[in-house]
Image (cartoon, grey):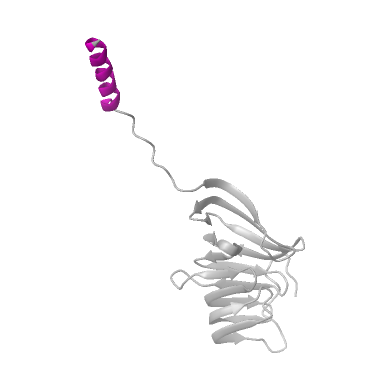
């Protein structure tokens, strides 16, 4: 009986002290590669479609990065294109990027929203764009401004220190936005 207890004790001790393989580090969240995804904000008839190299879930937010391109569709028709180094999808489906380029088809607008080091661009689904700086180009408009805020159609714009040119009797040239119209 004593031998059996000693044997069980020795086996138990060997089990406890035996070296185990190192555990793989646990990564937080989900990581997807080569992603294409759709975002359906609360606004009726609006859908965002994105493609990127990688999407990572981080504390309830999704960070989408690498070769990111996206489009906003209204009632199934492309409304605008979005290009950025990365986009964070925040609660409420708002989008945050360090800087972005946007092409708005109606009006042939090209926007550079912020620049590296100036601060983030915020795209609020129910409001539009917010950026610390903007550069706008269109056939009949060219310029830049600070503390920019606008709806998606550029019908309601607020900005500080605007410096814009409007050509008299002419234009800066044809529409440079693929599929765009004046």
Q: Nearer the viewer, residue 94 or 68?
A: 94
User: Residue lying farthest front?
Assistant: 1
User: Residue lying farthest bottom?
Assistant: 168
Q: Nearer the viewer, residue 137 or 15?
A: 15
Residue 8 screen position, x and y as percent: 28, 17
Q: Residue at x 66, y 62 (%)?
A: 41
Q: Residue at x 69, y 89 (%)?
A: 168
Number of dots carrying numbers: 0
Q: Quadrant of residue 181?
A: bottom right
Is the C terminus in the top left, top right, bottom left or bottom right quadrant? bottom right
Is the N terminus in the top left, top right, bottom left or bottom right quadrant? top left
Q: Residue at x 63, y 68 (%)?
A: 125
Report if residue 11 lies within the magenta region. yes
- Say whether residue 18 is left or right of residue 133: left
Residue 83 appears anywhere in the view: no
Relative to 11, does residue 72 appear above or below in the rendering? below
Residue 24 appears anywhere in the view: yes
Magenta part of the chain: 2-18
Q: Quadrant of residue 5?
A: top left
Residue 43 screen position, x and y as percent: 70, 66
Residue 137 screen position, x and y as percent: 62, 76
Q: Nearer the viewer, residue 78 or 43?
A: 43
Report if residue 3 lies within the magenta region. yes
Relative to 162, does residue 75 appear above or below in the rendering? above
Dominant SS in magenta: helix
- Say whether residue 71 is left or right of residue 33: right
Q: Residue at x 49, y 48 (%)?
A: 29
Relative to 57, does residue 99 appear above or below in the rendering? below
Residue 177 screen position, x and y as percent: 68, 68
- Say whether residue 139 is left or right of residue 61: right
């Amino acid at each position: 009986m004593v031998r059996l207890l000693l044997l069980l004790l020795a086996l138990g001790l060997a089990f406890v002290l035996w070296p185990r393989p190192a555990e793989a580090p646990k990564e937080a969240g989900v990581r997807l590669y080569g992603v294409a995804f759709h975002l359906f904000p609360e606004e009726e008839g609006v859908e965002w479609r994105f493609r990127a190299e990688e999407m990572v879930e981080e504390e309830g937010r999704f960070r989408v990065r690498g070769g990111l391109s996206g489009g906003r569709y209204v009632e199934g028709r492309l409304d605008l294109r979005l290009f950025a180094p990365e986009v964070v999808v925040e609660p409420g489906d708002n989008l945050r990027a360090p800087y972005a380029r946007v092409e708005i088809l109606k009006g042939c607008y090209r926007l550079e929203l912020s620049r590296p080091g100036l601060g983030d661009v915020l795209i609020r689904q129910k409001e539009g764009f917010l950026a610390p700086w903007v550069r706008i180009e269109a056939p009949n408009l060219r310029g830049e401004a600070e503390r920019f805020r606008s709806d998606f159609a550029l019908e309601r714009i607020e900005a500080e220190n605007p410096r814009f040119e409007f050509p008299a009797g002419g234009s800066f040239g044809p529409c440079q936005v693929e599929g765009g119209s004046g």
